[in-house]
Amino acid sequence: MMLITCPHCGPRAQAEFTYERTVDSVVQPGTDPAGAMERLFTRANPRGLDDEIWRHTFGCRAWLVMTRHRVTHAIEAIRAVGPEALP
Amino acid sequence: MTKYSALGLLRGVFNGQSHWQPAWRDPEPKASYDIVIIGGGGHGLATAYYLASVHGIRNIAVLEKSWIGGGNTGRNTTLVRSNYRQKPLHDFFEFGLKMWERLSDELNYNVMFSPRGALMLGHSDSDMAMLAQRGDAMRVDRIDAELLSRDQVAKLEPQLDMSRDARFPIDGGLIQRRGGTARHDAVAWGYARAADQLGVDIIQKCEVTGFVRQGDAVVGVETSRGQIGAGRTAICVAGHSGHVAAMAGLKLPVESQTLQALVTEGVKPMINGVIMSQSLHCYISQSDKGGIVMGGDPDNWPSYAQRGQPMVTEGAIAQAIALVPALSRLRMLRTWGGVTDMSFDGSPIIGTTPVPNLFLNGGWCYGGFKATPASGWTYAHTLATGTPHALNAPFDLGRFARGDTIDENGVGPMPNHR
Amino acid sequence: MSGPQRAGEPGTIRFTFDGKPLLARRGDTLAAALLANGIGLVARSFKYHRPRGIMAAGVEEPNALVTVGTGGRSEPNTRATDLFVYEGMVARSQNRWPNLSFDVGSILGLAAKALPAGFYYKTFFGSAKRWMFYEWFIRRAAGLGDAPNAADPDRFAQRAGFCDVLVVGAGPAGLAAALAAAEAGERVTLVEQDRVLAPSLVRDPQELDPAWAEATAAQISALGGQILLRTTAAGYWDDNLITLSQRLAEPGQQPPNGAAQRLWHVRAKRVVLATGALERPLAFAHNDRPGVMLSQAVRTYVRRFGVVPGQRVIIATNNDDAYLTAAAMRDAGAEVVAVLDTRPAPAGATSGFTVHNEAMPLATTGARHHLREVSARVGGKIVRWQADLLAMSGGFTPVVHLHMQAGGAALDWDDASQSFLPGAARQNVTSIGAAAAADPIGPTPPPENSGKAFIDFQNDVSLGDVDLAWAEGYRSVEHLKRYTTLAMATDQGKTSNMAALGRLAEKQGVAIPDAGLTTFRPPYTPVTMGLLAGRSERDAGAHLRRLALYDVHQAKAPTWQPLGYWKRPRAYPAGTETLAQAALREARSVRTAVGMTDVSTLAKFEVSGPDAAALLELICATTVAKLAVGRGRYTFMLREDGLVFDDGTVWRLGEDRYLLTSSTGGADRMATHISYVRQFLYPQLKVSAVNVQEHYAGIAVAGPHAKTVLAALIGEEVPRHMSTVPAAIGGVPVLVLAASYSGERAFEIYVEASKAEPVWSACEAEVTAHGGCLYGMEAMEFLRIEKGHLVVGGEIDGRLTPHDLALGGMLNKAGGYVGAEGLTRPALTQTGRKQLVGLEALDGTIPEGSMLITAPGQPAQGHVTAAGLRVLDGGSIALGQLNDGFARHGELLIASSPTRGLIARVRVVAPHFYDTGGERYRD
């Protein structure tokens, strides 16, 4: 069980978080349908680093983007997204 | 090759069992093959066997990066059943179930397929209605399914908690009596031995590191044991489908996640068949050695680590004890994780790819073991003829973009919501 | 002799083994007590039912398994060496019939030559039924102990722990490391699986005074460190999370405080593994007989427990450590008949024992219970001795299990000790002491008769089986394990792995590290399932939520129905009414007068801010922005793939303020979906979306008199259909939505959950005064089916488009909603798709969930999603999904349920059976 450092709450057990999807799966409404389906239905799914969207569901509920290694589970980077993270 | 039989074992009493031959050869890879199958799991080995036995194509290599049967074939909970609600799924798995019923004889290797029954419990009237619908869908397609009353369930599995005030009281069940379990290792070994006898080269410790291309087409593979030419190349690597397909520039509708399973210390028989549930996410059976084998949901986050999150198994165990209270004092002996290729409708992918000469068999989620014979049979057909068999035609790679997904649970494209 | 003297001292604890009353001394393991009582035969092996005694003194014991405790507390397969005797303990031998001494199963041993490793793969062919015939016997012969046949009466506790340093193992190395860390100001947790500190010092006090351990522990505690005895580090997970299992009572013992064990999830900054080493047995014929023990175990029984397991002992070794056992036995008054050392004679001082160099046991003979004779090859000769104990040592295997679980798969090979040592680790973990280094050993000659030279004792795997697996091509270590079942027993291969690897390397002609190594997986020792479940097993981890109005329902003794996290009233039967009778009465009351029901569990979201409509037009596939203030409408939501996944209503409460309702079962999913769209896709929107599902309770009032009831309750103009007004009932503020799910004029009254009871009571009084009653989910289901309203999980099954559900006309023409792109996929508009239809029975009753077929034997063309009845005349009707259903109105089909033997002829009709014009909504 990973230890995930939430940018808002600090290090917390993985049990507080839920994985939602990968960044490469995000479909912005209004994009061209073929491209949208390509994004929705395929994944790089690398045996290495990927950008993933998680949520601190049982904590502050923030949406997070983390760069995580799929074999070692090491988290290289993590940031919060949402209105409060806008520039 | 020595045929396996009881007489052979008796003969061994007098010669110290010294007359047995290796179950398969350990050949050096040839420069090229008609068909190269990447992945020496049950599916890859079955594919090779049916290519050789049904389609007469014997110039085949199965390349395995490690040792055969060591991936998900050797890590699953060995359930065999065809009790799916959706027609393309139950037709496919039923074809496979019929193959299981004669597989030991066909391979001359006892895969210990034991149809002790696959029971799905219902915990409310709405569960029972869903089970009836599933059963009716199967029965209309001539697949065995029987609705059981509460009393019938209690008689079948006396260890179940039948108390009315349970959080998930048991109201009845749907049983597929022809479902059951098999010995997972034996499936890989049996297919390997039978394929080897037909001339298939099974090459272990041979990892594919890239594809050899001629224009768009794949004409061979780069491996840790050198380049091997291939007329057709067949990906059959389960959880590593995305990784291997990426070498050919393909992105798949697959996400790799860990599925954990566990086994307890052995005890005398306490669970007769396979116990599953319409509302809970655990499945329980007892192996012939006596261990209670069980699993639950996947870890629901991407990983290739074959290493799980302990609280996921703890949750599955809580559900199992809620159903079978006597499991409480047994001890968990081993846990392990497999890398499952979670597809985006929960159904497998068997067919051609946009890359000429490259074929794909994957997306098995956590239900691949029971499919082994049908998967091998239909994939062999697809590889031999270049077009899918009627049974695997619905499971093509193009169905996602087209809108023809086969979604047993109706939960859509996020595998972690499954 | 140091350590406790046993001779002549009376036992103080009473226990039974196989019904025989015996005495133990405080601090005894069951193994020590059995040895002290002269009991040699303790168990039967798994496969051949061979007689077995006690081999080890710790968790590695492969042979001496017993069932301990009674009823739901009974624990099969408990190691006698890891079980401290308590007053009244009931232990039984297992895997034998009718008794341990005379076990019918042992005839399998006579057939052993025909039953080599993997024999079952080569025979029992024929039909699956035929295999099941053989399997019936195999299953009964296999297994070990019996599972308990009652529910567990005890609790299992769980706790989270955090520390700077977790030290695993309170031997000398672990204690020293823990003290050093505590002195450096670190928060220390020290765990020890035994019940005493530093048991190795009790065994070998010449190393360090055992009193040192107590003193060191006291210092650690004084510095704030935590020491947990009888606690095993079972699993090592990501980011230094270690699971500990702590015994609060012995197996089968009634726990003093109700909790039998405690599970810890400990997060440590760093971990120190002082897990010691396990002694290896030697492989020779009949090395499994009672009376053949590991050398250090013998020394442990003598020095720690004061039990001398034999009077004439042969020592067989390839290392120096076993000489300490020889000394301990001599000190205890036993005769050390001979020391067989595989190594050539050393130059220099002698040990004082009769030592035979280049000597290796060949075989043992004896009875079921005892050892009688040991033969050995000494140089070129075979020599025999009478002996009742053989203490063997094949060297030591550092316990690297947790290191490997930590992801430090790298192990370094040490040739001198022939052992794997911890290598580089991925996590912050170090190994120390005997877990990190082992003493050199001499050669280990292979047995001359490998057939009965066991290496995996519990599963009866001999070196001959390893040879057979090799000959048959099972040559990778994993194939070897799986083919022979080596290391698959409850001891997890702790004493067998290295012997197998050595043999495999020998066959391959390579060094052991090149022969491969299996992966050690959690747990280190088996862990009780109930402990892992914790307290969740009572509700299977799915905690039930309590309705705000639970008490008022319960007072009416309804029939409850589970729904997601909730239980909702299904019907309120009066007197001797059946559920169906009650539901029909309730539904008729709604059709003819008025009824009220609890709709609190519906998902509810309050969406507000300048961009509220913009967010809702992303979530909902219908238009929202055009709604006037005070109005509402039906809506539905698409997944990104264009398929409908939920539906509900949306209400404009103010200029920038909306209420969205959706299905109960989909509430969490909808909350996540809204949050994703709002937080991730459109963070720039100026909008707040709050989940108020449990903030408000909801009461629906429906029926021809509903308007009158509402007028009486709120004392002012009631809103017209699909309108909303704020109001008050008995001074409590409420929100009234004029929405109907029943086909009648109806209102939903939302009230802050904590203030719901008086509002409910006021409603009930008015409803009753107007000749109405409460209705439950069953009546609601009848009403909505008749009106053709959809339900999530029924008609909306996640596989249909809005067009399939006849909702296409409501789609927002401007697009822009989530799922608009997915909806353009070609197959979603092709013919042949399942479409929503109504079904009327021509005869009989339409079975719920049945298949729609054109004739018997034909494939299904669709299915019944919900079967109901015409509330007023009782006619059987249903909703269903049918291929090309829109074009098939009027067609006759069969609704068939083979699993229930039910069948009905049906006519396909439009999915509305009641008030198709919506006249009843009009004021």
Image: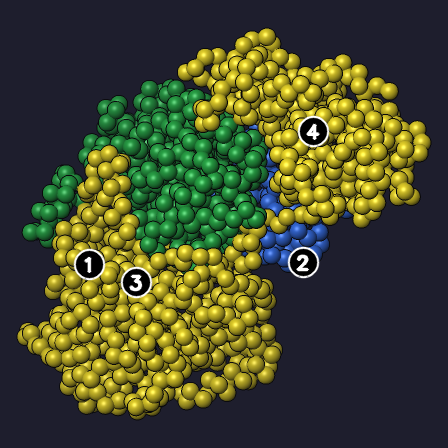
Residue for badge 2: A10
C899 on left or right of B197? right
Pointer 3 residue: C94
Chain letter for the residue marked with disc 4 in the picture? C
Is residue B140 rendered to the left or right of residue C508?
A: right
Q: Chain of mark 2?
A: A
Camera-near label (1 vs 4) is 4
Shade representing chain A? blue
| Chain coloured yellow | C
**C267 displayed left or right of C62:** right
- Discs 2 and 4 lie in a common subunit: no
Identify the chain of the residue marked 1, using the numbered disc in the image.
Answer: C
Crowding at label 2, few (<14), some or many (≥20) Cα neighbours within 10 Å?
Answer: few
Chain bearing tag 3 is C
> Going 45% across and 27% down the picture, which residue do you hit?
C899
User: According to the rendering, which colour does chain B have?
Assistant: green
* Residue sitting nearer the eye, C584 or C249: C584
Q: Earlier in the sequence, mark 1 or mark 4?
A: 1
